[in-house]
Amino acid sequence: MASAGIVARRTGRRFLSSLPALLGVLVFTFLLMRVLPGDPAVFFASGPNAGKAEIEEIRRQMGLDKPVPEQLVRYLGDVARGQLGRSMTTGQPVLTDLRQRLPASLELTFTALAIALLLAIPLGIAAALRPGSVVDHAVRFLCALGVCVPTFVSGLLLIYVFYYLLGIAPDPTGRVDVFAASPPDITGFLLIDFLLVGDWEGWRAAAGQLVLPALTMALFVLAPLARITRAAMLSVLGSDFIRTARSLGLPRRRVIVTYALRNAILPVLTIAGIVFSTMLGANVLVEKVFSWPGVASYALDALLASDYAPVQGFVLLMASLFVVVNLTVDVLYGLADPRVSIE
């Protein structure tokens, strides 16, 4: 109980210390959107030939007729009340759009991170156990290849091979097939919603749609995860307590899994948290290639249309998720190494 209280207090302090950073993100994004070229009122008034009265009316609706400092104060007040504005593109509140699209991005990101970890950790361990061997060089080559190939290129290659040539992947047009029925909107995560209603055929169809985009993202983040696993394992395997465990005749599997991997997992947790936060914001190309209705593609469409509110809401959402991920990593640190909680 005492340890849990220490973790809770430490997490609370970290959360409070992150609030000024969130405020800075809000102000910076707001000002950045105001200095971008183009007038959103002209865009939404059906082009440059629209009447002046129509443009001024749209500017009034968007609050652009006020001085920038007043706009900023009003925006911060709206955010404090949980209002992120209304999207001129969709006509809906930004909070509603983000709530509808966030599960799609999270489902894709969680699945991709799980695939990447399932591949990267064994590869990193195998490379660390045989440094300088063929296995080590093969793992490092695979990591370099994953970093060099952009996500949209690997995504298009996967579509070409598995959908066009082999015909074993479904049509890459969203989360479900255009002719399939969607499940009731319970959690927003299709795999979970299909399970809750017991629709196994729909679950298999949704999982099939998820495989290629998730694999595309997993290949992109495989390199940092495998590299940090290899480096951490090499450092731990050279430690005195590992040499002692081996000299005592403990089974090799127990030495590697119980002693070495547990001590090497802390830096992997750190890089996994950073990778997850990066994937949420950087998966826009994957969402566009696979027509995935996530928050990143939503923000890009709004940016191209000079629609301020969705972009500002997206950046705030990403910053908030980054804070949550960091707090989660702190808690996992405490579970993996109790000394962190005590400190």
Image: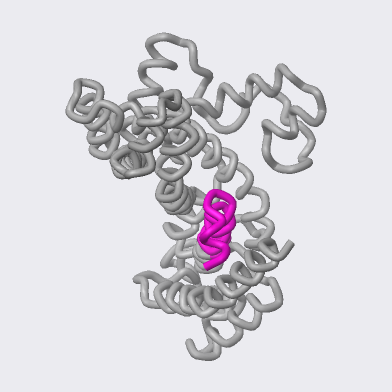
Left or right: residue 73 compared with residue 29: right
| Up-down relation of residue 251 to residue 9 (above or below) | above
What are the residue bounds of the magenta stretch? 320-343
Would you say the magenta stretch is mainly helix, strand or loop?
helix
Looking at this view, is 324 or 80 the one in front?
A: 324
Image location (x, y in percent) of residue 259:
45, 38
Residue at (49%, 56%) from the top-left corner? 299
Image location (x, y in percent) of residue 234:
29, 39
Looking at this view, is 218 or 332 the one in front?
A: 332
**Residue occupying the far top of the picture:** 166
Left or right: residue 2 compared with residue 263: right
In reply to whether residue 340 is colored magenta, the answer given is yes
Looking at this view, is 189 or 301 the one in front?
A: 189
| Up-down relation of residue 95 to residue 12 (above or below) | above
In reply to whether residue 333 is colored magenta, the answer given is yes
**Residue occupying the far right of the picture:** 197
Image location (x, y in percent) of residue 290:
47, 33
